[in-house]
Each structure stands twice: as structure tokens, then as C-alpha cells.
Amino acid sequence: MKSLIYGLIIISIGLVSCKKDQNRITVKTEDITFTKEGQLNIINNSTKKVIAKLDIEFAETAYETQTGLMYRNSMAQNQGMLFIFKDERPRSFYMKNTRIPLDIIYLDTNKEIVSFQENAQPLNKNSLPSNKAAKYVLEVNAGLVKQWQLKIGNFITFTRL
């Protein structure tokens, strides 16, 4: 009986020790960094002049389009992410797990802007839909749509590296 009691005491001490050690565990996380995969120009449809030039990452696979810019802490003003879908249809994005405010620009098959959502707030789960069918979606830092004075009908060109 004594050995059973001593055994239970030793197991209890071991469990308490393990629990204390678990509280000391720290998880190291790394910032997700930008990887330049291409270059993109936004062009004024009436003057044909370049409004903005961006370094871009592409989101094309199911994983890339589902995660997008989630979990990132920052993005430079000359960077963006271009989502390329297989078909043109109404799109809707949200900011779940996205830590930086964004402008979301929806483009049709001809790469013309059909609508945009400005100043999408970080971590917000509300739907941010396109007003028309879109095949491409460009995410840039919040405030750039206004700064660049983008209009419906402006268009993009892009190249891959």
C-alpha cells in the first residue's frame, strides 16, 4: 500500500512539473516576407499613361488564393498581390487573419477595373464583394486607390519574372 501511495505522489509531482514546463514554452514565429514574382502597371484608360508600377506576388493555387496576404505584418507601398482565377464571376474577399489594411481592386477578363473596396479593415470577417464579375483581384495597401485616383475602366498589365 505504501508503495502505491509513493507511486501516486511521484506521478503527481511529475505531472505538475510537466505542466509548469508547458507554461514556459515559447513559440517562435517568423514574419512572412514578400517575394517578388512579377511587375504590374496600372494604366489610365483615357490617357494610356502609367498611374502606378508595382512589384507583385501571384496568388493562383487554391492555397495561395485562400491565404492571400493573411498573417503578414506589413507590405511596402510599391508592392501588391495579384489573384488570378480560372473564371470570371462575382468575387468576394474578407480580411480574416489579415493584419494590414488593404484596398481590394476587382478586374475583369480584359484586366479592366470593374470595382474596388477601399480601406478594408484588418481582421474583419465581413464580405467585401465585387460589383461585377472579376477574374483578377489586386490587393494593395489601403489608401492607394484614392491616392492614385483610380477609376472604373483603368486597366493593368503585368509580367512574370
Image (cartoon, helix red, strand yellow):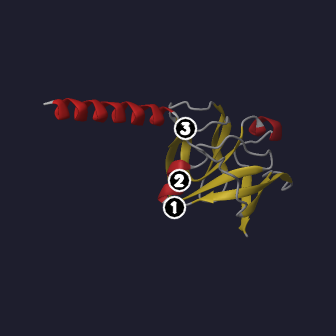
Q: Mark 3 sits on what residue?
A: 97
The residue tagged with tag 2: helix, strand or loop? helix
Q: Where the C terminus falls, by quadrant?
A: bottom right
Q: Marks 3 and 1, Cα distance to the nearest angstrom? A: 19 Å
Where 132 falls versus 82 (above or below)? above
- Residue nearest the observer in this picture, 30 or 36: 30
Q: Are marks 3 and 1 in contact (CB under 8 Å)?
A: no
Q: Mark 2 sits on what residue?
A: 65
Where 116 falls versus 86 (above or below)? above
- Residue nearest the observer in this picture, 10 or 81: 10
Q: Position of residue 111 (x, y in %)?
A: 66, 57
- Residue nearest the observer in this picture, 41 or 109: 41
Q: Are marks 1 and 2 in contact (CB under 8 Å)?
A: yes
Q: Which mark is residue 61?
A: 1
Q: Position of residue 24 (x, y in %)?
A: 52, 34
Within the image, what quadrant is residue 141 found in?
top right
Which residue sits furthest bottom?
Answer: 161
Q: What is the three-letter code of the residue carrying label 1?
A: Thr
